[in-house]
Amino acid sequence: MKRAVITGLGIVSSIGNNQQEVLASLREGRSGITFSEEFKDSGMRSHVWGNVKLDTTGLIDRKVVRFMNDASIYSYLSMQQAIEDAGLKDEVYQQNPRVGLIAGSGGSSKSQVFGADAMRSPRGLKAVGPYVVTKAMASAVSACLATPFKIYGVNYSISSACATSAHCIGNAVEQIQLGKQDIVFAGGGEELCWEMACEFDAMARCPPNTTKRQKKRLVPMTPTVMVSLSRAAAVWLWLKSWNMLWRAARTSMLKSLATAQRPMAQTWLPRPVKARFAA
C-alpha cells in the first residue's frame, strides 16, 4: 500500500487568512469569536460568531465567483494557498486524470433558503437566478473548484457535519494508498449566516449571550456543545503519493495521517448545557 504525504496547506478562518496569521493567533492565544449584530437583529439567543475578516471582492474572477457560495469562495482561496505552498505548476495538476479533488461542506447555504423563499416575492420563481443551483447543492465546494482548477481526476464531496473535512482528507489519503490517484486536493469549507445558525440556536447549540470580557476567551466546552456552526472557514491540504514526493525530492509536512471518526449521535444529541464561558 502506498504512503501519502502533505506538501501544501491553505487556510482561511476567523483567526487568520493564511498559515502565518493562523499560527501567530494560536501561539498568542487570540480568539476569533466576536459579537454579531446580524445574529442579534435576527432574534437569536446567541450573539457571538467566528466570522472571517476578509474582503473577497475582486480576489476571484467574476466569471468564476458567480457560481460560488461563501464556503466555495473560502475554499477556492485556500486551495490557491495550498498550490502555492506546494510550489506546484499548472501543468502538473491541470487536466491530469491522476489528480483529484475531495472536499465538502457540513452545512447548507443561505442560497437554499433564498431559493425556497423566492415564491414569496412578487416575481415568484423568476427571482431565482441560474447560478443558485451551484451555490445551494450539497457538492457546491467540489464542483465550483474542480472546474476552474481543471481537475480531471476523482471529484466529489463527503458531507458528515463537523467531521466533513476530516473525512474528505481521510478519503483522499485512501485514494492515494490504493493507487487510484497520485495527487489529491482535500479539505472543506463552511459559510456563516444567520439563516443556518438559527437552526442550531433552536437546539441550544450556540454559545449564549455573555459579557464583553467573557466573549474574549472561550474555555473548553462540553462535548455536547456545537461551536462549528458559528464559524466560517476553509482548510485545504495538498496530498501526494510518497513515491512521487521521493522522486521530486520535496520535503513533506506530514508522512502519515490518521482520522478519528466520532459517532454522530454523540455530537448531535440535544442535552442541556450550563457553563460555557470563563468568568
Image (cartoon, rainbow, N blue to C red):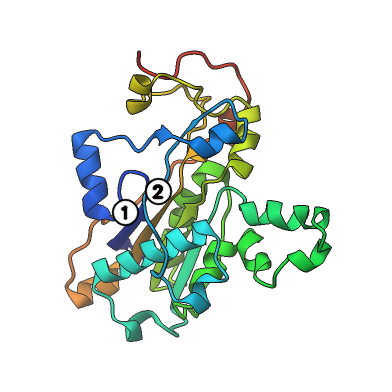
Q: Quadrant of residue 143?
A: bottom right
Up-down: is 88 above or below 2? Answer: below
Under mark 2, the amino acid is Val
Residue at 76 percent across and 54 percent down: it is: 116
> In the rendered view of the protein, which quadrant contains the N terminus?
bottom left
SS class, disc 2: loop
Residue 259 image point, x, y percent: 42, 46
Is residue 157 visible from the viewing direction of this image? yes
Which numbered tag is attached to residue 52?
Answer: 2
Residue 234 image point, x, y percent: 42, 54
Residue 146 image point, x, y percent: 50, 74
Under mark 1, the amino acid is Asn
- Callout 1 environment at 10 Å: few (<14), some (14 to 19), or many (20+)? many
Q: Is 222 positioned to the left or the right of 88 in the image?
A: right
Residue at 49 percent across and 63 percent down: it is: 102
Up-down: is 247 above or below 53? Answer: below
Q: Which residue is mark 1?
A: 17
- Callout 2 environment at 10 Å: few (<14), some (14 to 19), or many (20+)? many
Q: Is 277 positioned to the left or the right of 204 in the image?
A: left
Q: Is 207 positioned to the left or the right of 128 in the image?
A: left
Is residue 147 visible from the viewing direction of this image? no
Q: Nearer the viewer, residue 124 or 24?
A: 124
Q: Nearer the viewer, residue 30 or 114?
A: 114
Q: CA distance from mark 2 to mark 1?
A: 8 Å
Up-down: is 3 above or below 179? Answer: above
